[in-house]
Image: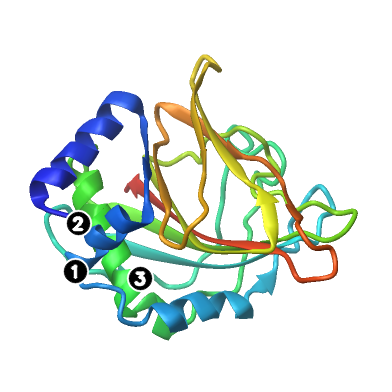
Amino acid sequence: MSSKSMDTLAAGIAREGFAHVHAPEMRAVLDEHGGTADWDAFAASWDDLGLDTYMADGGRYRKRRHAAFAMTPGSDAIRRKPHQPHYQSRDYNTLNGGVERWFQPVLPEIGAGATMSAILRACRELFDALTDVTVWHIEVHQFRIEARPGEVGRPTPEGMHRDGVDQVLVLLVRRENVRSGETSIHDLAGHKLGSFTLTEPLDAALVDDNRVFHGVTPVEPVDPARPAYRDVLVVTFRRE
């Protein structure tokens, strides 16, 4: 994707508050920022996530890893921060907010790998155009949402929400034997602005968290006899 196309994408987010980016377009973005040479290892790392034990709904359907990084506008330099908890106030997460949540860290080779680096650099360039910032605080979340017979998997158990950051990327890594998982975007008054389903690896949603709410419908297995899950990478950028 050329810089002109990146400008077009930024203009679309500035106008609408979100963008749905299809896999070929997202791949072109990442290719311009170093590419995805380690994609197979990157995607396989979702098979080694720890159970999220902080689910206030009692669910055992979510696995995750977490990491924090820092970047500055105009620079592709990425600094991984010491491992730290993920925290959201109850103003943004009424279900699981209000506590420090410690998750297993993103593996070093994944956090420093080609794919993650390309994702962070592409996001930094795009979000620089949308937010006046001196230093970006970045959090990366690897999520696997599992679905079983009689127990749906809830990608956003807190419902329609904001994350309490500035900009958000949701990148699909894999869908295995699941149906639904539709993303909806609403404005701050609750009016629906759009909806779509991430179906192919590298399909993505980009969200201006200051301007819109987002949520994802539960997933359920297509074939109850087989494993069923939805793997995504969520990356949030916040002014430090």
Label 2 amino acid?
Thr
**Percent from the top left, x then y, of residue 112?**
34, 79
Residue closer to the observer: 168 or 105: 168
Q: Pointer 1: what residue? A: 77
Q: Pointer 3: what residue? A: 116
**Percent from the top left, x then y, of residue 232?**
53, 60
Do the residues bearing badges 1 and 2 touch, measured as CB atoms within 8 Å? yes
Front disc: 3 or 1: 3
Precedes in sequence: disc 3 or disc 2: 2
* Position of residue 51 in the picture relative to residue 193 (left or right): right
Identify the residue at the far front of this view: 223
- Element type at mark 1: loop
Badge 3, how many Cα within 10 Å: few under 14, some, many 20+? many
Mark-to-mark CA distance, 3 and 2: 17 Å
Residue closer to the observer: 98 or 126: 126
**Percent from the top left, x then y, of residue 100?**
62, 56
Label 3 amino acid?
Met
Q: Residue at x 52, y 54 (%)?
A: 199
- Element type at mark 2: loop
Mark-to-mark CA distance, 3 and 1: 13 Å
Do the residues bearing badges 3 and 1 touch, measured as CB atoms within 8 Å? no
